[in-house]
Image: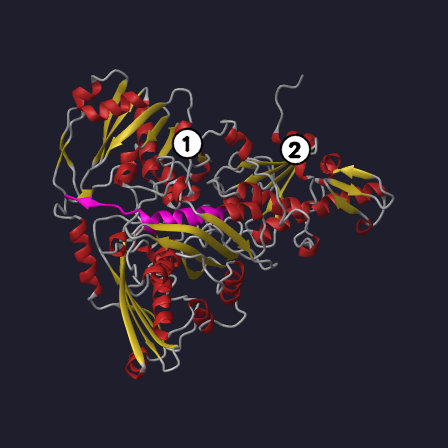
Amino acid sequence: MKSQMTRRDFLKKSSLVIAAAALPGRMGLFNVSPVLAGVDIPFKPHAFLEIAADDTITVWVGQTNLGQGTHTGIPMIIAEELDADWEKMRVKMALAAEPFKSPVWHMQATGGSSSIRHRWDLLRKVGAAARLMLVETAAEQWKIPAEKCATKDGKVIHPDGRGLTFGQLVEAARKQPVPEHPPLKNPKDYRIIGTQRERMDIPDKVMGKTVFGFDFTIPGMCVAVVARPPYYGASFQSYDKKAAMAVKGVIKVAPLGNRIAVCAETTHAAMIGRNALDIRWSKGSHPDLNDDALDALFKEHLEKPASVAKTGGDVKKALVEAARTIEQSYKLPYISHAQAEPINCTAHVEKERCRVWIPTQGQTATQLTASQLTGLPLEKVEVMTLPAGGGFGLRGEQDPVEDSVLLSKTLNRPVKVIWSRKDDFANDRFRPASQCNIKAGLDKDGRVIAWSHTVAAPSVMSRLMPDYVKDGIDPDAVSGITDIPYSFPNLLVSYVKVDSPVTVGFWRSVGYSVNAFTVESFMDELAHAAGKDPVQFRLDHMEKDGRPYNILSLLAEKSAWGTPVPEGRARGVAVTSCFESFAAHMAEVSVNEKGKITVHKMVCALDCGIAVYPDAIRAQAEAGVVMGLSTAFHEKVRFENGGVKTANYDDYPVLTMSEVPEIEVHIARNTLNPGGVGEPVFPSVAPAVANAVFKATGVRLRELPFKRELLIKG
């Protein structure tokens, strides 16, 4: 028996591997392992699709499984163009590598609702090219023109009805040249895209087989927890190493800059060892920082000279000439990602390679970080992406990667760094707080003729992508305003950067999650001032039959807007355009005399282009409602004594099941290129509720989370 088999032998005997190369329009054959392959294959590996001799079809996905459904949606796209037998489809997570980078961002990352929308053409071409190669192979064997062959359910079919399975053709098909521009299906012929399919990742999750990062183990591994400063700008002044080392199971106490790691054979021992350090910390750089100080800081900045992010027309002149002007301010807090699975990372640094196992949203960043810390070339750093228990943008941060790699180098063994829930809250990269002032002018007919909007907020981009900050403008901080879905003849958007020690980062739907609340709340205020129906007022300021116009119209139809509301209830609406998609929400609420708001029903209408995987889209939309209500009613990070006060869910409540309303989701039907899903279904939830509350009570809620004490009667 032959005990050694080369990769080339393996390919010859078992599979065909196809994908798109880095150069636009070019495709090639390569091995399934993007890091270890390429030794005897003349093409740079870009492993997306593998078809085995037993007819099994494996799709290698480079995007993290965050529970969003892309590990089924992406295979659906390839399977559609391939004409695959869906029952033969399998999905595997790929290593971090060049082929899996976004063609738009040029990095491998999971965020911004980009997994499908950035790869739509690429994924279709992968399946279509494979299908064409298989067809031409069968046609050659049958000695007939390829155009006379058909494909269906994993077979190439002869005009007389006989067929060959894909698996029977792969060995010969791999010799075919890969077509650069394979013909793609007409959407009217789709039989997989847009249909109901069972999620490929659900069975293992239900059976408890899925290994998340927090549960991951490797032989010889130790566990590390890290003590980080409890105050911004603090450093340790003393600690009791001897006491920590005395804890059974503790094997190393390792200072890492301004933090101290305790490594142990078990998680429990590491936690106890960290407690035993009895660290004395300095007061930090901002000992007086607390909620009130931060609130005052934002108000102060809102009065400072601002940088102009967008201008059109003459707002100053239009406001003077307006028949009526309205001005209001809004306030949103810092909020946590609060994901279910705490942060973690496992690394093993060896002489010739570094392996990292992590539920990351930033594979390229992880690979770069490990390469820089170890001095190893990128191709020697393998990043194995594990399923994540939630992310919402936080899992692209590199703190756990840095710690696990450095500690593995120090201990010369695999190290898993884990964060406790308290660590998660204290060291989060929060969604930025924001305060804004908006002033608008209405003409005699109640139309908006001027809109001036000034935002004071920290800058995420300054820390993570400084090249995107131009002339003092962080585009993320004003997203949803500079690209407002309305047409105003005079518009001025201004931004003031707020500098504070509180670190901010990307959070689901980024700036839109903040600015949609202010824009849509104020639009409702203007509609009321103009004496107009809130839906019609919005439609009157949109391009007729544009996508925002149509999705709001769909929402009005499906939510029975304009029909009588059940006694004691009121309705509110809001609409958002972001990530190449368009979403609108209707909230139906009641408010009792004690100020308790009950959301009875939420209706979501979403135009995300072609609906590749409708079941996942509905699930994302439902989750967007739940998360949107949670931030509207509960979530706010607290600060005191120069650090984060919030320590756990007991002082950071999230929405409970008893608060979840009836949710309807309506997906617009079209065949446009796919847009985002996970991000757009969130921003318009809170303003829809706030607008409904006003309709019910006459009280405007201009701050999140809602101050329900304003609603108490008597």
Q: Is residue 97 above or below residue 326?
A: above
Q: Could you tell me the amino acid type at mark 1? A: Gly
The reply to whether residue 232 is visible in this rendering is no
Where's residue 86, x and y in %? 66, 39
State which quadrant residue 408 falls in.
top left
Where's residue 701, x and y in %? 30, 59
Foreground of the two, 383 or 492? 492
Where's residue 161, x and y in %? 85, 42
Q: State which region is magenta.
A: 620-641
Secondary structure of residue under mark 1: helix
Q: Is residue 680 magenta?
A: no
What is the CA distance from the residue labelled 2 to the residue labelled 1? 31 Å
> Label 2 neighbourhood size at 10 Å, few (<14), some (14-19), many (20+)?
many
Q: Is residue 152 above or below residue 421?
A: below
Residue 213 disc label: 1
Q: Is residue 236 left or right of residue 248?
A: left
Residue 11 disc label: 2
Which is nearer the N-term, disc 2 or disc 1? 2
> Label 1 neighbourhood size at 10 Å, few (<14), some (14-19), many (20+)?
many
Q: Residue at x 22, y 45 (%)?
A: 638
Q: Could you tell me the amino acid type at mark 2? A: Leu
Magenta: main secondary structure equals helix
Q: Quadrant of the C terminus?
A: bottom left
Foreground of the two, 171 or 377? 171
Q: Is residue 178 above or below residue 698?
A: above
Q: Is residue 633 magenta?
A: yes
Q: Is residue 92 above or below residue 528?
A: above
Tell which tag, 2 or 1, sits nearer the viewer: 1
